[in-house]
Amino acid sequence: MINAVKRDIPDYLLKNGKEVYQGKNHMDGKFVRKASVRNRMCVKSQESKIVPSLKEAFVQCGAHDGMTFSFHTELRNGDYVGAMAARTLVEELGLKDLTVAATSLGQAQDVIADYIEEGKIVGVQTSGVRGRIGEVISEGKLATPAVIRSHGGRPRAVEAGEVHIDVAVLAAASSDCCGNASGVGGKNNFGSMGFGSHDSHYADYTIIVTDTLVPFPNLPSSVSAIDVDAVVVVENIGDANLISTKEARMTDNPRELMMAEHAASVIAATPYFKDGFSFQTGVGGPSLAVNRFLEEHMREKGITMSFALGGTSKSVCDLMDKGLVRHILDTQDFDEGAIRHIFSKPGHHEISLSEYANAGNKGAYVNKLDYVVLSALEIDTDFNVNVITGSDGVLRGAPGGHPDTAAGSKCCIIVTPLTRGRMATVCEKVVTVTTPGDCVDVLVTDYGIAVNPLRPDLAKCLDDAGIAHVGINALKEKAYSLVGRPDDLKWEDKVVAIVESRDGTLLDVVRKIKPVTV
């Protein structure tokens, strides 16, 4: 069946009430029946929940063949707990037919790729796939298609019972003996536990893994002891120094700074830029740099931001410290500055992924966004954006909150260079649709600005401000004139991954790439 972004979704995937994507507001107002939470009662007095090892904690929590386990990745590239959980289940307990339901997967969990190839892990449900795991899935080695959801789509699926987590294994910077856990207070602080806190409510069992045990009660806690079954103390939950990646650092590239400056000018030209506006920026260098130039426009106009949303960096915290942001609503922290800032500054709040972006609740915070500035691997002439597959068709990215914030905001701005290396970023048709074009409003590149024809009001704002813009087809042709038109990828019929829209409808599929024959 052809959906609203012109992607052919195989009919066999449309079962159990699944629909194809039909527009960003198609599911608005429909009822979702939440899954019942299975809760193990503890009525006897309990001195401690500390268990000597993760293996024993899994046994205590009834680990079995065919189970689904989850973990969060607030520690990003420095996470040890995800791989630790997988090794324990596969190598120490000898379990098989496992499904991973992680918030994201990357290089830190590369061992999972081995277990996929061995057939021990047969399912993947995640908000991102990078590294060897993405490669083996793209090669068709996973027994079932991976399901890729946004940061809002994941809690929606969990709450609706589409993803049932048997055991959640949650890293914590600190915990007491009963499982009151936090992302700070230890030797590997990572800040917000917004990724993991939601799983603790819906998993049958929750295991806290920490490298810093503190006296009871560890309050305020991000995960409450009332949702925790076992606490395991290890030497290190990860390396917090690896949280900040080169993609999440403020850029000093002149081309990226120019694009960031233009994006800030676009924001300043629109009617939503007034006292009390709200804002989120993505993790990419150019989008992060928008904060720097936005400050100048805010001071010039004498306005402040009501709240900044989502993943948080030091640049956003600096704006709060300067009195330009009243609240930060934080799901994850991208650098040491943000980690130090959360919980130490009034107005910097931790929120869960469900509060942040779940389209299945009665009002996620993304729906209150005025602006979001995001990056892209590709954007096509229909303004569809790809952030999960490379030009070779291999899974190597994460939708994260990209589709959620684009859909919820009044103005979504994509900032990306026209080309990367020998690849056109602005193209005829993206490899995979991650964020639908009806959610994207403005494109800012190093060769010009384009406005989605669906937003003539924004085009007029730019005209009134004297900001030049062109049709997106002109940018595509310029890109092709610089690097050439790419050859079409050749696909096999086998679907290796399903891309769900944030509302649970099917947005796109990723097929196995045909091997190149010489």
Image: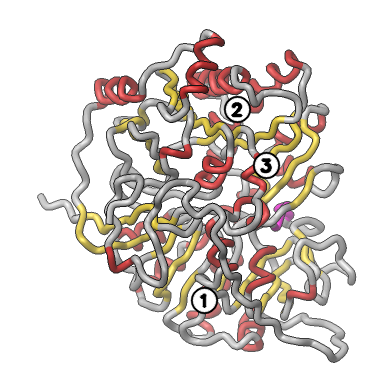
Q: Which mark is residue 309?
A: 3
Residue 57, placed above or below residue 248: below
x then y, percent, for residue 33: 58, 70
**Is there any visible trace of residue 246 in the rendered image?**
no
The kind of secondary structure the magenta stretch mainly shows is loop
- State the image quarter where residue 35 is shown: bottom right
* In magenta segment, residue 190: yes
Q: Which residues are magenta?
A: 189-193
- Up/down of 268 relative to 41, above or below: above
Front residue of 373/393: it is 373
Return the mark for residue 289: 2
Q: Residue at point 71% right, 34% down? A: 316
Neighbour tally class for label 1: few under 14, some 14-19, many 20 plus, Cα within 10 Å: many
Picture quadrant of residue 387: top left
Q: Earlier in the sequence, mark 2 or mark 1?
A: 1
Give the x, y percent position of residue 439. Answer: 48, 39
Asked whether the beta carbons under mark 2 and mark 1 sit within 8 Å of each other, the answer is: no
Tag 2: amino acid? Ala
Three-letter amino acid code of the residue under disc 1: Thr
Q: CA distance from mark 3 to mark 2?
A: 16 Å
> What type is the residue that disc 3 sits on?
Leu
Residue found 81% across the figure and 76% down from its top: 178
Residue occupying image coordinates x 41% and y 72%: 16
Instruction: Confirm or deny contact between disc 3 and disc 2 (CB under 8 A).
Output: no
Query: Circle 1 is placed at which residue position?
Result: 68
Q: Position of residue 364 (x, y in %)?
A: 65, 51
Q: What is the spatial separation of the Cα atoms under label 2 and label 1, in whole angstroms? A: 39 Å
Q: Residues within 10 Å of mark 3 (few under 14, many from 20)?
A: many
- In the rendered view, tell whether residue 11 sits above or below residue 362: below
For discs 3 and 2, the disc positioned in front in the rendered view: 3
